[in-house]
Every structure is written in structure tokens, then in C-alpha cells.
Amino acid sequence: MNYSINIVWSDEDEGFIATVPELKNLSAFGETYEEAVKEVKDVIEGYIETLEEDNIDIPAPSTLSCFSGQTRIRMPKKLHQLLSIEAEREGVSLNMLMVTLLSLNYGLALKKNKSKDVFMVYLNDNKTANYDLRLPNGDTSRFSGSGQVRLNNNRNKVGEGLW
């Protein structure tokens, strides 16, 4: 069976640690990347044999999923109205506005997840999206320059200058 293998360097262990997401609590160590791969494959094989001997279901390997890039979303009528008005005001499609807002907020959340800071995004009249950083202690500071993303109504271009 072909299972996913994650390999990371460990300063503490001075070697590579290999884990298998589909098989919780399995890991292997190797002084080299290749050794970690070999070791984790041996661990997987032994684990599968044990499951088979004990008549326990063997977890299926993960596979890559294909996504269409389309989804249906339900929202309150008022939010739909406000987003539609904003898209028209910005001169972009409702779809482009929503993709832009989702992309900005998702990217900022990923970028700031480690520090637990929260970003708020809002659109200006000049087709830029500003964002405010709200620090855990309640302070608010405004970014400038790199804190703005110009919206484009050019072929599916979400924004420039964010990351």
C-alpha cells in the first residue's frame, strides 16, 4: 500500500523524523533523509502485518483529490446584497470580489496563525483592500504600503503585493 510520508528535520534528535498521517502514532528516525524513508516503510509493513494478524481493518492510504474550483455557498440575503453592491461599486464580478476577500483573509490567517493575531479586511473606494492588525491585547495598528492590495478586474487576477 502507498501511504503518505511526512519527513521533517529534528534539531533535538539530530536526524530526520518520518511520520505517516494515515497511520496515527507511527514514526521512524533516520540520520539521513533516505534512512528515515527506509525505516518508516519498515514500520508501515510491520504495522500492517500486525493489523492483519489481529483481523483489524487496515486504514486506506490517502489520495490526491481533484477540485473543480467551484462551490455553492449559502449566505444571508443581506450579506448577498451588500457583497453585490460592493462588487458593482468596485467594478468587479461578485465572484471576483468573494474570491479576493477569501484569498486575502485566508492568506493573512495563514501568515499570522503562529502569533494568534487577527486581521480585518475591508475595501476602499479606490479599489484597494486595507487590512488592520488587531493584536491580542486589543491594540490596533494600520499597515501602509504593503498593507494594501489593489483589486484588478483583469482576467481572474485576485490582487498584487500581498505576499
Image (cartoon, rainbow, N blue to C red):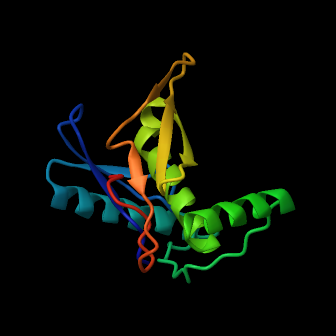
Q: Residue at x 85, y 62 (%)?
A: 77
* Vertical relation: 39 (above or below) 52: above
In this view, which residue lies farthest toward the left?
Answer: 32
Residue 41: quarter of image? bottom left
Residue 88: quarter of image? bottom right
- Asked if one can make out residue 87 in the rendered structure from this viewpoint, the answer is yes
Residue 60 is left or right of residue 82, and the answer is left
Residue 151: quarter of image? bottom left
x and y percentages locating residue 16 in the rendered image: 23, 48
x and y percentages locating residue 8 in the rendered image: 28, 49
Q: Name the residue nearer the viewer: 94 or 24.
A: 94
Q: Quadrant of the N terminus?
A: bottom left
x and y percentages locating residue 32 in the rendered image: 14, 53
Q: Name the residue nearer the viewer: 102 or 132.
A: 132
Give the number of marks. Answer: 0
- Asked if one can make out residue 117 in the rendered structure from this viewpoint, the answer is no
Q: Residue at x 56, y 63 (%)?
A: 90
Residue 84 is left or right of residue 145, and the answer is right
x and y percentages locating residue 122 in the rendered image: 57, 46
Q: Name the residue nearer the viewer: 146 or 137.
A: 146
* Vertical relation: 126 (above or below) 91: above
Q: Residue at x 44, y 52 (%)?
A: 26
In this view, which residue lies farthest toward the top?
Answer: 137
